[in-house]
């Protein structure tokens, strides 16, 4: 739809001033940026139409994330991820080019109207119940137990010596501390610890740089056997190799000198404190073993809710259906909550990504009721079953790979 203008007088001269433009859902759906004839990218938020054609590359959450939703209504995703709406609206305002025409429905025709309506009512109830407000004591105690474990790992070697048993016990304690710190940085990355974004970012940098440190497939690899070698490749090697090398590479190439300096403080602290107790060979072995244990723990937990699920490219489904297709839960228990950093409530985490994790169990019954009302499967399984499903899924995908490349 072409822009419309009206004339107004300014110092005796007629000046063209843009007026409100009206669009249909069909107009928006054509602006995905995929059509060579229409390179524009539009999105809809609360009936307002925004042109993100030039902005999407500067999107703080990544260009791919926002551009993949071009041509769609992103209201629920926008509300879910953006905590400071007033700040974000300052950036949105210059991008607005119009609104949906009065005769257009508020909910995109491709989406389940009743499900979208019920979820938005649920979201409003969640906000009224205060479930998006963090409990400072919970996160303080969580950080305290991380620091205590981190200190205990060193004290075990200092007080008990560096023989085999203290060495192994210290390794395990430090691994627990590092993994629990990983869950805390995940909370901070989702802006769920503090109400103000900047405080989440500041503590996130501290945890990532001072407490922890934060592939393309090849045809010739035997993916039909990936369920066998997965145990000794990705889980133990992700942190010690890829994550660390990639983190330093990004910091250097992007010239994040402050971040680079902060990351180096972790290594300085580690090698100074543990280097005074262990010989170089033992020190290097200690470092790589605890990193491998940490990596294995992190990968198994983070993938148990995703690898077994049916994950496709965006199909422009409603927010609830998209999240329920892509993830599942693991049964609740005090151990499971602690061991997984509450990622056993992955469904609730996907639906409410900024919700503090100590409130997942409170909203879970409401989400189950919503799913039951609309006939959506709410998957929840035991922890060991979730781990086994990773292997089964890898085996199945490996067989599909074999069919595709070897034509068997």
Image (cartoon, rainbow, N blue to C red):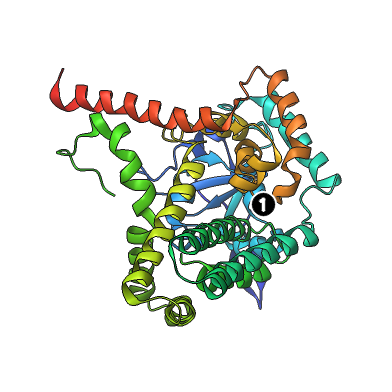
Let me know if residue 310 appears in the view.
Answer: no
Give the x, y percent position of residue 190: 61, 56
Q: Position of residue 70 (x, y in %)?
A: 47, 44
Which quadrant is home to the C terminus? top left
Measuring from the top left, give residue 314's x and y in whole percent: 45, 35
Q: Which quarter of the picture shows residue 350?
A: top right
308, 271: nearer the viewer: 271
Q: Name which residue lies at 54% across and 46% down.
A: 43
> Which x, y percent locates residue 226?
28, 34
| Above or below, comparing residue 306 to residue 174 in the picture | above
Which residue is under mark 1?
A: 354
Residue 358 in the figure: left or right of residue 315 = right
Residue 23 in sight in this render? yes
Count numbered badges in the picture: 1
Q: Is 187 placed left or right of 294 in the picture? A: right
Badge 1 crowding class, 10 Å Cα cut-off, few under 14, some 14 to 19, many 20 or more, is many
Which residue is depicted at the point 56% across and 58% down? 95
Instruction: Name the residue rendered at 32%, 32% in the picture.
Output: 227
**Considering only vertical position in the picture, is 210 above or below 391?**
below
SS label for mark 1: loop
Whether residue 232 sits left or right of residue 278 in the image: it is left
């Amino acid at each position: 739809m072409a822009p419309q203008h009206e004339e107004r007088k300014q110092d005796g001269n007629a000046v063209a001033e843009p007026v409100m433009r009206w669009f249909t859902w069909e107009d928006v759906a054509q602006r995905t940026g995929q059509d060579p004839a229409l390179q524009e990218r539009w999105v809809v938020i609360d009936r307002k139409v925004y042109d993100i054609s030039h902005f999407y590359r500067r999107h703080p959450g990544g260009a791919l994330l926002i551009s993949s939703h071009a041509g769609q209504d992103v209201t629920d995703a926008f509300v879910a991820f953006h905590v400071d709406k007033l700040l974000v609206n300052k950036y949105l305002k210059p991008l607005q080019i119009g609104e949906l025409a009065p005769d257009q429905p508020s909910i995109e025709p491709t989406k389940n109207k009743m499900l979208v309506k019920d979820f938005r009512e649920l979201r409003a109830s969640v906000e009224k119940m205060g479930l998006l407000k963090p409990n400072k004591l919970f996160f303080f105690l969580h950080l305290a137990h991380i620091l205590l474990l981190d200190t205990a790992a060193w004290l075990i070697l200092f007080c008990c010596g560096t023989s085999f048993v203290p060495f192994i016990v210290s390794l395990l304690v430090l691994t627990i501390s590092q993994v629990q710190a990983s869950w805390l940085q995940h909370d901070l990355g989702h802006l769920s610890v503090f109400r103000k974004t900047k405080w989440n970012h500041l503590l996130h940098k501290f945890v990532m740089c001072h407490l922890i440190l934060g592939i393309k497939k090849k045809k010739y690899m035997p993916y039909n056997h990936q369920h066998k070698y997965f145990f000794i490749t990705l889980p133990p090697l992700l942190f010690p190799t890829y994550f660390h090398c990639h983190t330093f590479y990004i910091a250097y190439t992007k010239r994040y000198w402050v971040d680079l300096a902060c990351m180096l403080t972790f290594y300085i602290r580690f090698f100074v404190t543990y280097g005074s107790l262990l010989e170089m060979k033992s020190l290097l072995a200690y470092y790589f073993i605890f990193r491998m244990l940490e990596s294995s723990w992190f990968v198994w937990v983070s993938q148990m809710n995703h690898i077994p699920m049916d994950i496709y490219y965006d199909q422009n489904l409603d927010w609830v259906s998209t999240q329920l297709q892509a993830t599942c839960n693991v049964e609740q228990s005090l151990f499971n909550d602690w061991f997984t950093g509450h990622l056993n409530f992955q469904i609730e985490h996907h639906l409410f990504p900024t919700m503090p994790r100590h409130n997942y169990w409170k909203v879970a019954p409401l989400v189950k009721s919503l799913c039951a009302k609309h006939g959506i499967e709410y998957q929840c399984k035991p922890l060991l079953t979730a781990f086994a499903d990773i292997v089964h899924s890898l085996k199945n995908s490996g067989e599909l790979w074999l069919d595709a490349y070897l034509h068997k």
